[in-house]
Image (tube, coloured by chain):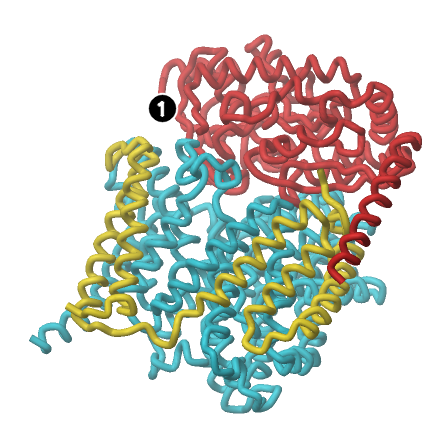
Amino acid sequence: MNPDWRNNRDLIAGLLFIVLGGLAVVLARDYPFGTTIRMGPGYFPTVLGFILLLFGVTVLARGIRSGEKVKGEWGWKPLALIALSIVLFGALLDRVGMIPAAVAAIVVAAAAGREFRLKEALILAVVMTALSVAVFIYGLKLPYPLLGGYY
Amino acid sequence: MQVFSVTRLLALVLLLGTAQAALAQAPYPAKPVRFIIGFPPGGTNDIVGRLVAPKLSEFLGQQVVVENRGGANTAIASEMFVRMPPDGYTIMMNAPGHATNPSLLKLNFDSVNDFAFITLLAESQNLLVVHPSLPVRSVKELIALSKKRPGDINYGSSGIGTTVHLSAELFQFMTGIKWVHIPYKGGGPGLVALLSGEVSLYFGNVPTVIRQARDGKLRAIATTGAKRTSAAPDIPTVAEAGVPGYEVSTFYGMSAPAKTPRTIIDRLHRDTVRALNAPDVRERLQGLGADPVGNTPEQYTLFMKNEIAKWAKVIKAAGIKGE
Amino acid sequence: MDFLGNLALGFGVAFSLQNLAYCFAGVALGTLIGVLPGVGPLVTIAMLFPITFHLPAIPAIIMLAGIFYGAQYGGSTTSILVNLPGETASAVTCIDGYQMARQGRAGPALATAALASFFAGCVGTLLIALAGPTLGEWALKFGAAEYTALMLMALVASAVMTQGDALKGLAMVVVGLLIGVVGVDVNSGMARYSFGIPELVDGIGFTVVAVGLFAVAEIVSNLESREPRDVYTGKVTGLMPSARDIKDAAWPTVRGTAVGACFGVLPGSGPAISSFATYMLEKKIARDPSRFGRGAIEGVAAPEAANNAAAQTAFIPMLTLGIPATATMALMLAALTLQGIATGPQVMLEKPELFWGLVASMWIGNCLLVVLNLPLVGLWVKLLTVPYRWLFPSIILFCCIGNYSVNNNPFDVYLCAVIGVLGYVLVKLECEPAPLLLGYVLGPLLEENLRRALLIARGDPTVFFTRPLSAVFMIATVLIFVVMVLPAARRMRRRT
């Protein structure tokens, strides 16, 4: 057994596949299974789930044997910031309009970078927001308010 | 710095507030009107909407902006729509899905009472076509053959719950015959299957199948509307040809959220009917196989109630389940 | 046949100065919007489509053809430059195209893509003019059993897609198949894995998957290490392909064109499968398969040629049968219908000037694409010298707007963030996204057709072997499986 399982590449991949496959099988129990000749909506996903489970176990076993590590480090901070930036855009566009949504998305995304400078990010935000407003709102006539919400 | 921006923000909010108040006093319409379409761009619904919108803008004197919000056969758009302020600045296009969704999905809104129906924009109908290998030439022959070979004839559709599918279910429901449903994903693959003979029967939208019927690749049997279609006046309706009372229409309607003032509804109704009567709009709609209607809000409301009730019956009898 | 006369008629219609201007405008707009990351061809065409509303029929179609090619090529450009496929077909271009860009060879990659597309486009146009109706009939030979067999064959062959670990590659295909299951089941109408969320009833859209899996994962991987490293090498070696590049890319282009032209005719799945298929083929017959995935120019030329040839022959079922093969085609069909052009078997006879005008304008659209894009290659390559810290937030913003604009629903944007997290984790675990995408595309088709075939055959499984075309694919599937498993088995035996 490899004590440092946290960074064991294939062990984590195998676990992930097992979880996904297991989830697929469990959720598919709500759908009629049918028979091989007359398959119900549950047939295909259940079979796929089991196949994925099988792959997962094999990958996991190989991970335990080889103990190969994940290359490089995990970028949790940039991942969180990029995801946040995307979510912010979606949440803000409906409520306060295109301009604040775009500015927020750019600034938060830029914060994920290594050499983040607030001033530079703000300038970038202004330029890109102006560009996207010009292209999408004025050019392509997408019906989003610049400022202000829908509701 | 912090305090300063807060006061600025407050001032801005106040300013926006007064602007809003001023708008409320101005006569309708004082700002652009959003026209919501419950499908992504490119479908027939979208095209009908985009045909009507510019003409309606002309008569209203305000821009009518088409906005697509696709998903779940208009249910996603409706769910957002019914929460909109009933001020006439948001209107929506209704499609057959509006009448069938109550029987297929769990909805968070009331398909009749949450809407103020304005007018039926246009109606189109389906054409019952068969592959030439199926030895029938009329509705009566089709019924006779189906009775002789129950559960043997395959019919195709563009998906479960579409008017293509439901036209066939209503036909079976009213005549007591039994076919096998082979659903396809969208009208394109469904038509290919019919042309290749994989399925023998299909209720296609008139403009999509009329050419192949004229060309002899398919045989036209009957149309599903209450009246014969202007695109092919020689083809009888199903009702005429042996199933009295049978009627399926693919419709395009316009509604506002419930509680929209009657004066605004009347204004929208008047200008929409004018837009529908414009020759170029009329001509392009007919090119899509849709006949412009433009009935009154009362007629449209009644129409919608009848449609919902009709499909509830058929969907229950056919055992179709959504969620 | 008076084929030349017809073509001359077509060019006579299309070759007015006004029409050329519309075509050029279409290509330019299509490229410029399509090149925005996260804005795929379908979205581009949908956005630009209203512009053609008020034009007369012929200029409108010509402009649309321009938009269509521009949008497609714009999608390929983002695949190469920032690893973001605009549609399924260009996902394959990402694999080697993006690696070339990182090595400072974005110029040759882009130029090769344009030239290979142009070659394939010319062949495709000729095919439509010469054999359109015959090829249209070919599409009718494909029933549910044939599709099932074809999909099985593609799935078995998909192991070739993976660069490193075949086992994890296959697992990724299965994950993709499962993502494809989300949404309403075509055969029963039941919503699966939708968790009661109405937005999931329609399934997970391509843009959402592509942006999350490719763009987000790639950007985060580039940002993860604390010490700065260059995403793109600063050194740009040549804007145009060298003589060696052209020699390397020539045959793959021809083969890609052939594969694409055959698959493109099949409604629904053709264009997407063709680029995967041709990539697998090239990798299998290459003298040194290990070059693939590290910036092999064949890996750009072949799928791009296939993609474009398929896009071209995808017009065949539409023109001769009146049936749109893909969502993009459905949009084009809608545009034609709106112009009062009923497509179908008769259009060639009734309105020859329209039919041949369209054929000619497709060629012109292709041609103008090269004219416009070869000079632009320099500009796109310049774009990569923009500091990455400015580039990636802009990519994220455009991806968000592109995703949002499909349904105007924030849910798609949220979902994209979730898929992005999953995508990054998978990349870290060295699981490749391309096989997942293949599974995601094939999954619904396989299940749908398998169940349909059995339904039509009333449950008789021999249907897959009694229909000749289906039997051929089934045998080929078994052969491919044996060819792939044998060397591995031999290696195992030698080891023990």
Residue sticking out furthest to the top: B244
Residue located at (38% from left, 82% from top): C291
Q: Position of residue C70 (x, y in %)?
A: 67, 65
Label 1: which secondary element: loop
Residue located at (19% from left, 69% from top): A3
Chain letter for red, please.
Answer: B
Chain letter for yellow, please.
Answer: A
Q: Position of residue C383 (x, y in %)?
A: 65, 78
Whether residue B86 is visible: yes
Residue located at (34% from left, 62% from top): C158
Q: Colour of chain C?
A: cyan
Q: Position of residue B16 (x, y in %)?
A: 84, 44
Residue located at (41% from left, 22% from top): B179
Q: Is residue B159 left or right of residue C452?
A: right
Q: Amino acid at mark 1?
A: Asp
Instruction: Judge whether B280 appears above or below C4 on screen.
Output: above
Residue situated in front as seen by the camera: C159 or A53: A53
Instruction: Judge whether B10 appears above or below C362 on screen.
Output: above
Residue pointed to by mark 1: B152
Residue situated in front as seen by the camera: C174 or C318: C174
Instruction: Judge whether A77 appears above or below C377 on screen.
Output: above
